[in-house]
Amino acid sequence: MTDIWSPETKYRIWFEIEAHATDALADLGVVPKEAAATIWEADRNAPPFDIARIDAIEAETKHDVIAFLTHVAERTGPSARFLHQGMTSSDVLDTCLAVQLARASDILLDDLDQLLVVLKRRAEEHKYTPTIGRSHGIHAEPTTFGLKLAQAYAEFARNRDRLAAARADVATCAISGAVGTFANINPAVEAHVAAKMGLTPEPVSTQVIPRDRHAMFFATLGVIASSIERLATEIRHLQRTEVLEAEEYFAPGQKGSSAMPHKRNPVLTENLTGLARMVRGYVTPALENVALWHERDISHSSVERYIGPDATITLDFALARLTGVMDKLLVYPERMQKNLDRMGGLTNSQRVLLALTQAGVSREDAYRLVQRNAMKVWESDGALSLKELLKNDADVTAALSDAEIEEKFDPEYHFRHVDTIFDRVFT
Amino acid sequence: MTDIWSPETKYRIWFEIEAHATDALADLGVVPKEAAATIWEADRNAPPFDIARIDAIEAETKHDVIAFLTHVAERTGPSARFLHQGMTSSDVLDTCLAVQLARASDILLDDLDQLLVVLKRRAEEHKYTPTIGRSHGIHAEPTTFGLKLAQAYAEFARNRDRLAAARADVATCAISGAVGTFANINPAVEAHVAAKMGLTPEPVSTQVIPRDRHAMFFATLGVIASSIERLATEIRHLQRTEVLEAEEYFAPGQKGSSAMPHKRNPVLTENLTGLARMVRGYVTPALENVALWHERDISHSSVERYIGPDATITLDFALARLTGVMDKLLVYPERMQKNLDRMGGLTNSQRVLLALTQAGVSREDAYRLVQRNAMKVWESDGALSLKELLKNDADVTAALSDAEIEEKFDPEYHFRHVDTIFDRVFT
Amino acid sequence: MTDIWSPETKYRIWFEIEAHATDALADLGVVPKEAAATIWEADRNAPPFDIARIDAIEAETKHDVIAFLTHVAERTGPSARFLHQGMTSSDVLDTCLAVQLARASDILLDDLDQLLVVLKRRAEEHKYTPTIGRSHGIHAEPTTFGLKLAQAYAEFARNRDRLAAARADVATCAISGAVGTFANINPAVEAHVAAKMGLTPEPVSTQVIPRDRHAMFFATLGVIASSIERLATEIRHLQRTEVLEAEEYFAPGQKGSSAMPHKRNPVLTENLTGLARMVRGYVTPALENVALWHERDISHSSVERYIGPDATITLDFALARLTGVMDKLLVYPERMQKNLDRMGGLTNSQRVLLALTQAGVSREDAYRLVQRNAMKVWESDGALSLKELLKNDADVTAALSDAEIEEKFDPEYHFRHVDTIFDRVFT
Amino acid sequence: MTDIWSPETKYRIWFEIEAHATDALADLGVVPKEAAATIWEADRNAPPFDIARIDAIEAETKHDVIAFLTHVAERTGPSARFLHQGMTSSDVLDTCLAVQLARASDILLDDLDQLLVVLKRRAEEHKYTPTIGRSHGIHAEPTTFGLKLAQAYAEFARNRDRLAAARADVATCAISGAVGTFANINPAVEAHVAAKMGLTPEPVSTQVIPRDRHAMFFATLGVIASSIERLATEIRHLQRTEVLEAEEYFAPGQKGSSAMPHKRNPVLTENLTGLARMVRGYVTPALENVALWHERDISHSSVERYIGPDATITLDFALARLTGVMDKLLVYPERMQKNLDRMGGLTNSQRVLLALTQAGVSREDAYRLVQRNAMKVWESDGALSLKELLKNDADVTAALSDAEIEEKFDPEYHFRHVDTIFDRVFT
């Protein structure tokens, strides 16, 4: 990802845009065909662009595109004068940015694909691993660890679709001149360059490609970052000492702390939480970039010099890190079961209540019966078992057999539709 | 738009969700078919929901959904006990929010459609109205006022597509129980309610619909708001005293100020600029809402109580206002021409330079010839005409005839591809 | 707080600004002294402002200040024509906003004072209540619950200072005319009104009071909101089922859920988390309001109509809610101790290591001795006690007596400086 | 500014914190005084820190502070084992960040001082340079260019005060151990290091310094950036072709464009507009950093690695650039006068209206008399002069003499209080 934003890559893309444009101009008869061919030929035989040399010329001319073209002329010879005919700097700069963002998108899409593969594998692995579902941080009802991961999979699959749409939004080519009128360059040049660079022509530009496209792109990155934060936060919660249902991977001999063996910190997911804040922070500047003055002002440029590389590199790093965390995540089903059991079976009290009602007990009585046993369990901090208490409550057993009571505590009851949900998510 | 967020509408949607769910439960044999029918029947014969009554019950029970169901029971009779079987409050609340956001989207899509109609009409009207294109706020080359509007049209057409995608993202239905396992309710209920409410079933929910969907929705509104700011800023620039190429509509007898007839302020577009800031300001809270704890926490709820209505109502108002501004915008082609002429024809200096070169003058000499005349025009603040000076410069006329010089100042030259661009945008 | 933003209050402030300005003009001899006196007198004898009447006039005149002055004239009689002499609307509007923000600040400062009182009381109460300190969500070393609250106290005391500074920043008065030159009004009027309204004169205004002041104000509210989120998040963590060291208050007979006695959700602090997001969301629009065009544009106005009331009312509500939560917070020292003991004393392993070294054991050996016992505790999930294992490890007892070992597990050791810290925070 | 954030500086600060802490420990008798002296002595005689070596150690140990201490030990010899006694990494890291932010603040304060000097000089220079004041981008009443700059001066003077307060907020020292209890280190160490490093002791820390301090710091930078945007936007407006009252400096021989002499773009202030967006964009991540979990989580760290350098370096660059722009700003008083005259004197219509009333003409008649002349001026686009038309209107001259009319167009009238305002701002 860093390569995409290197000077070398940038100049390579500039060259390709200029050379393809010259080809199109040659086809139109505006410049000699031989010149266009020579430009490519000379490039093939020349050493790589000399960044230091370009910098030196720019220090003098104070103009990046002119500096580049001067350097290209040094490598190419007289044919170079047929480059950039009728074009403006923005034609090169904005189309280059489109190529960079498209390539960055491709890497990020690949990152997402890898994350999805890992999430799917771990979800299948733990499809039926029971764990407590929590609302408000409080135990609610049982779910499975696989379902948690299936949710994450579905969320990142949505993000993949969104990123693909955002990529299409920014992958446009504009070679339309000083105010977008094609006054000095035929639209056919734009069409040719677009095709060669894997872009679509911008229907209407105004020296620049409109920045609502880029705003949408960076906003989409902000949404993806927020999803990263969600999953990272989940892992951080699961790893906290009192919960410890999962942990970021620790190599066998690794030490969390020189003295305290319990000190394994979820530093990777904490780090991801911070990175998500940064990627989100780039959304507002991108939105503020939209309202350029008239046909263009250049205020967007400094913003993009920061957020172009920073947002994509950070998100690439974060997605890869998250994939690594999920790939190697240490999962502790026994601890999950222990936590599930922690409330002494209270999470099933509602099912018993319903069963009593169906067995003919009035709702008020049923509630009282369940409640008086549930309260004992609650006061024992889960040391007592609701199921056992109920089996020993004559008023309860008058309505329900032991087997019936037992059935109400069957965790499988909660998992009957796991397969349905997996089908919905993964197929 | 305000109606969508009224208590009346909310309770109506809640009722429909509950009643459709009861229909599905009846089909499954879980509740009596007669009860389901009675629920609809009773509603048809009952007066509207009594908001004050529901509020009074909620003050007691401290639970909004229970208060609502209690009130429904008062209107419905005993059959009401078959409502809400196996459902949790979030099933109702989140599905209701989806309906509200989908309806809000429909209004906003309609707003965009109306804006597009107006922009297209005004663009066609001024397709060939010459005006100066400006980069950096500085005169660059001629364009047409229609092209400016075509750009705005293309931008809002993109926004329409984005909003349609965002609508699809939030228009999902979740009726999946306390932690999304369907433990106490058959997925068929969700499917039925989704179909009836015009939603698609949420593939995997966790008591709540995942908030990346809403984040994407509000981020999209933020992009649209930024496009509004762009067009509003353009109008504000065009109306400033020294430019005055266009103005927000003033009724014939209207007074801008009691004493100063020139005081017509672009207050509507200034207002739009501020409104855009607000809609953008709601994006970050929406992004922060994504990382809920475990299967859900309720921190998103207070945020959505603000931004649900505020973002959609504000954007609806802003789009309608912008449509009104553009519909009635006073356009001053004469002033545009006057401004175009302001630089004494300097905007065509590049074309003359090129023509001299093509006529055999060396590039260095050609530059010097143009420059010496251009400088006089510049120093005269546009009082002198470059064209006339060139016609009186013997070194120039030695290479170019008066007719050839004249041709280089033909504004039509810049507009040769206007039709192409219009085709790209509008067809 | 809502009263501050009501039309009644706004018009009352407008009246006072206008009437005080008229007094000053009378002192300057610009208007008759009797007229100024009559204006106050008439107001004392008149019924309250008729909002509906003002609205009706505004519907006609499309100008809020003119509508107000017309209504005042109806209540006052001919003397009213001496109101508003040489003033512009912004003189009234901006000075009114300053008064409103100053009053809002006073309420918020009072909110903070009340929160500080509660935090101090609870901190003193739990000054020596042992609890585990957690870094990365993982048990680290013991601290006291009082120290946690002392930290919160110190943070909100800083916020109080910041808000006092922010109040001073916005509490300025500008009565300086159309572009701030005092062309038609003597600066003495501004000085008089400022003194009467409890403001300081704005040194240089440009029709409007510069918006960097308001930006700083709302940014400060954003910082306070973030501190609210921090304390709210702490409570949410402490209340989660596996931790349960503290809980939002539940009335004795209150039910968290109809069936599950454990279902007490930290809904108030979750709500506070969401409200913090909103108040933070208002910071960026306030920052974007700074760069008004030239002497002023009115884009800030729509933003302030939202965030003026919304940010202050939300923060007032949030501070009061947080104060209530902290006032009645249920604290469970036994559970804190249980969690402290959960690691079998591992949190003291470092002290033992150090003691062994000081007793002459090499660092490497000491580490090995502690480690082999610590690992057993770790593997037992805290069922074994490190202290007891050490007392039964002959290699350890060769260097340390039982009393010495015992002393290393003295929790008091960690609390020797609590008093120092309390002194630093509370005195 | 970049130096502050270099590894060399960071390690130098780390060393000083550690060595000063060892001094304090020696004073307390915890470590030998000779060791403390040796540590400083060895450092004086050693080559600079070997960054590559520290990186190599960190690659192995995965711990930055341990890697640093290992390298220091290599340079220092056995006395190094007395470094870091009872300290945790955060003691070093957070105190180092405080030193860096304090130093960054000093540079920024100096930047602001330089900007203030320039603004004051240019304000004095143009104290009485007449220019039109604009509200809504529309001509309002005359002001002076010096007043515009005095406003900017006052705004940046406020920003200086705010930054000084923000500096005090972050310049604290925490050496308080794993959870801030001073369990293993005497508070006297913190006091000593604080004094030596120019900081104040943090009253209560929790392994980390609370992040509300940093949030306030970065929020303040966001306000300053917004003020930069305001002044930059003013320059951009003044430079636009139709206004051209001021321009960013162009060197005599410099070319704005190869062909168009009018093409001098305000690229520096456009760039500043973009940079302001970036610095503002860092505010929200800083606010989100406040709510760390329990005694600390490390999510703030990745955020600060970006925004610590990025926000301060960007703001330093922006302030220096703005100072340069204002220092060399080309101001065109003649063009200002030309623009002032552009409306044919309409900006004085209100004064004439008032004079007619005072001369006994009824308000209605006076309005009609002014209006009928003003409208002619307006329709002539400023070609006609209101003053001359009035002098030729018999109904007007019946009430006002030519001299009286003339006086109403005296621009000096508007500038009577300029001196008062300058006194308020600059003394």
Image (cartoon, coloured by chain):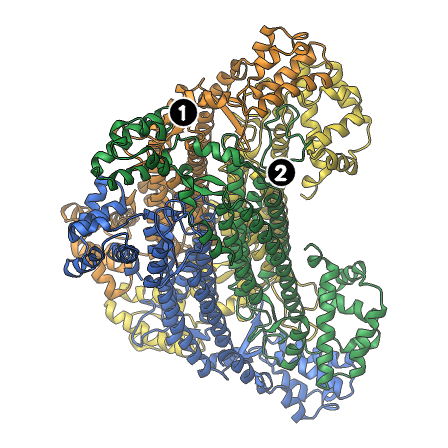
Chain colours: A blue, B green, C yellow, D orange
Chain letter of the residue beneath label 1 in the structure image: B
Q: Is residue A327 left or right of residue A333?
A: left
Q: CA distance from mark 1 to mark 2?
A: 32 Å
Q: Which mark is residue B249?
A: 2
Q: Quadrant of residue A246?
A: bottom left
Q: Is residue C389 left or right of residue C13?
A: left
Tag 1 secondary structure = loop
Q: Which mark is residue A126?
A: none
Q: Which mark is residue B383?
A: 1
Q: Is residue C262 left or right of residue D216?
A: right
Q: Amino acid at mark 1?
A: Ala
- Which of A177/B345 is in front? B345
Q: Amino acid at mark 2?
A: Tyr
- Which of B172/C40 is in front? B172
**Which part of the image, by quadrant, shows the N terminus of chain C?**
top right
Local crowd size for mark 2, using a 10 Å CA cut-off: few (<14), some (14–19), many (≥20): some
Q: Can residue D371 be seen by looking at this rendering?
A: yes
The answer to whether C265 is drawn above or below residue B368 in the figure is below
Q: Earlier in the sequence, mark 1 or mark 2?
A: 2
The answer to whether C421 is drawn above or below residue C168 in the figure is below
Q: Quadrant of residue C195?
A: top right
Q: Position of residue B99 (x, y in %)?
A: 65, 65
Q: Position of residue D306 (x, y in %)?
A: 36, 52
Q: Quadrant of residue B289?
A: bottom right
At a point 79% along the width and 33% down the height, the residue shown is C48
Q: Position of residue B261 (x, y in %)?
A: 62, 26
Q: Position of residue D53 (x, y in %)?
A: 18, 58
Tag 2 secondary structure = loop
Q: Is residue B123 left or right of residue D313?
A: right
Q: Are marks 1 and 2 in contact (CB under 8 Å)?
A: no
Do pointers 1 and 2 mark residues of a single chain?
yes
